[in-house]
Image (tube, rainbow, N blue to C red):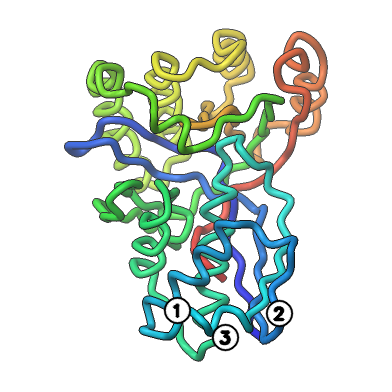
Amino acid sequence: MAEACCPASCGELIQGWVQGGEHLISCPIDWFSTVEVSDAAPLTTERPKMRAMLSAVLKHFDLPAELGKGLRIRFDSTIPVGKGMASSTADMAATAQATARHLGHELSEIELARLCVALEPTDSTMFHALTLFDHKAGHVLAHHHWQPEVELLILESAERLLTRDYHRLDRQPHLLAGAPLLGQAWQHMEQAAERHDPAALGQATTLSAIASQQLLAKPLFAELLALVEHEDLLGLNVAHSGTVVGLLLDPARHDGERLAAHLSRPPFTNHYPRVHRARMVAGGVR
């Protein structure tokens, strides 16, 4: 038996046309999908993508597909599905590493990334560092080795949007129109990582979120931006291919409990019935 876990993401820090294509940096948080692989008959409660990943790992190690009939997948995850919180990536990456470990191997981050993107567009949460990632081709464009001390208030919508449905949208014109804003966001992101500056990080995420409104508008976006300004928060970020919004807080300066209580009333609850508190963590499969 072997186990692995991978963090969720509160949307993306940035996503859009940057560095020559549509790329992203995920926002790993302290929610996890934990997967266990053992020698036993498969369960009917498995998620299909987990089984698909187990089969992909067997193929990766040139092992017969028949071996999968004797491998059981158990999982524990409270990550909301279809909200843009990288639930599928967490499930797939954790399954891949748990399967590899059960077989006596350890997959590298880039191997995990390639296995995941072979199944569907993927978040960058399998990387320990904040990583600018081609979520469709699996290429790494940059790593930022800095762990921000940031708390998030996550506004969860009742609406769902599956990754495959988002990628069916005609996004190219909007992505290109948003490229100047994403260029600015990328500059702020690089400054944030170089100077260890959460304020610059918030500027990057907010610019990317503004650009994303042209593609996938979030309800009460103007009101949330006004709250960021009024409370002098670090910024906000969004799930660019999902429905959640995150408010970035400095835990040393901002009262997360008070702000969560404020967001737990109308008009916010009309569109975001659940508010969660989380903190940014390093990515990577544990």
Disc 2 from disc 1: Cα separation:
16 Å
Q: In this picture, is 108 found above or below 275? A: below
Q: Which of the 4 image quarters holds residue 166?
A: top left
Q: Which residue is mark 3?
A: 102
Q: Earlier in the sequence, mark 1 or mark 3?
A: 1
Does the residue at mark 1 contact the one at mark 3 (Cβ under 8 Å)?
Answer: no
Tell me which label, 2 or 1, sits earlier in the chain. Answer: 2
Q: What amino acid type is highlighted by mark number 2?
A: Ala
- Looking at the image, which is closer to me, 214 or 165? 165
Q: Earlier in the sequence, mark 3 or mark 2?
A: 2
Report the residue at 31% width, 40% height from top: 23
- Within 10 Å of disc 2 (Cα), the crowding (few <14, some 14-19, many 20+) is few
Q: CA distance from mark 3 to mark 2?
A: 15 Å
Q: Residue at x 57, y 76 (%)?
A: 98
- Residue 194 visible in the picture: no
Picture layout, residue 57 above or below residue 250: below
Label 3 with label 2: CB-CB less than 8 Å: no
For residue 62, above or below residue 56: below
**Which quadrant is the N terminus positioned in?**
bottom right
The quadrant in which the C terminus is found is bottom right
> Is 168 in front, or is 244?
168
Outermost residue to the bottom: 104
Residue 151 x/y as whole percent: 63, 41
Residue that badge 1 annotates: 58
Q: In the image, 255: left or right of 91?
A: right
| Mark seen at residue 41 | 2
Residue at image position (32%, 21%) is 170
Disc 3 marks a residue whose amino acid type is: His
Q: Quadrant of residue 159?
A: top right
Look at label 1 and name its amino acid: Leu
Residue that extends furthest to the front in the rendered view of this protein: 66
